[in-house]
Amino acid sequence: MENTRKTAIVTGASQGIGAGLVEAFLKRGYNVVANSRHITKANPFASSANVALVDGDIGDRSTATKIVDTAVSKFGRIDVLINNAGIFIPKAFIEYTAEDFDILVSTTLAGFLYVSQLAVKQMLQQKSGSIVNISTTLVDHPVAGVPVTVQVMTKGSLDAVTRALAIEYASQGIRVNTVALGVIKTPMHKPETYEFLKGLHPVGRMGEIKEVVDAVMFLTDATFTTGEILHVDGGAHAGKW
């Protein structure tokens, strides 16, 4: 019998936004392949036949292969890929090291490239699919006093490739979009920084994980939307305040 239950892949899924996305897809009746470096040890989700956990560095092509092979062999298809894995290294431009750069490129760029290539191959067979990348609003609205230049350099590549891939595969049923975030209240940020981080948004607060999940789910369902950079940033991209 043909498998009609949809399947989503979520990278960076052990906590924060990634874990929230996994739970949301499960509630919608999806199968989910969830990845992070040590996700089987963290084991953040209730045991379910609809969840497959895949350990590994997303910047390693063998991890991407394992993720996609798991999705296809266990669930038969790939309908959604969420490129959520990320790392945050805020520094003055002249203080970034070669090691910092290598980590950012591996996680953000290689982590997008390898799994997306393999997922698209499967989506082409199905003649349908949706990719959503997680980026930052700082790409097109830098903020004085928030030095993340090399971070923005790598995330900006996701914004650019979103539009290029959307055009390349629009006629073949594959959509590609990005959610550009403000600062979201996740384990990445220490509570003592919250007061400062609230001030980076015109609405005067940090974002919540649910608000990111809602945006991703909108793009997953929005079948006439592709090549979109959707800002979920409390208005920060709109201008100076």
Image: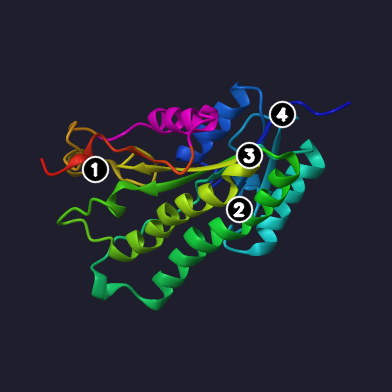
Residue 149 x %, y %: 28, 64
Magenta range is 206-225
* Labels 1 and 4: the sequence-earlier one: 4
Residue type highlighted by circle 4: Ser
The image quarter containing residue 223 is top right
Identify the residue at horizontal 25%, vertical 70% (top origin): 93
Q: Would residue 203 appear left or right of 66 to someone viewing this image?
A: left
| 212 magenta-colored | yes
Residue nearest the viewer, comparing 67 with 230: 230
* Residue at 35% across, 42% down: 181
Q: Amino acid at mark 1?
A: His
Which residue has dot 3 on it? 173
Q: Is residue 47 visible?
A: yes
Q: Residue at x 74, y 39 (%)?
A: 126
Of badges 3 and 2, the one in the foreground is 3
Q: Element type at marker 2? A: helix
On the image, the x and y values in percent for residue 120 come to 66, 49
Q: CA distance from mark 4 to mark 2?
A: 25 Å
Residues at marks 3 and 2 touching, judged by CB atoms closer than 8 Å:
no
Asked which secondary structure carries label 1, the reply is helix
Say above or below: 52 vs 100: above
Report the amino acid beneath label 2: Ser
Residue that appears at 47% across and 59% down: 108
Identity of the amino acid at label 3?
Answer: Gly
| Front position in the image: 95 or 114 | 114
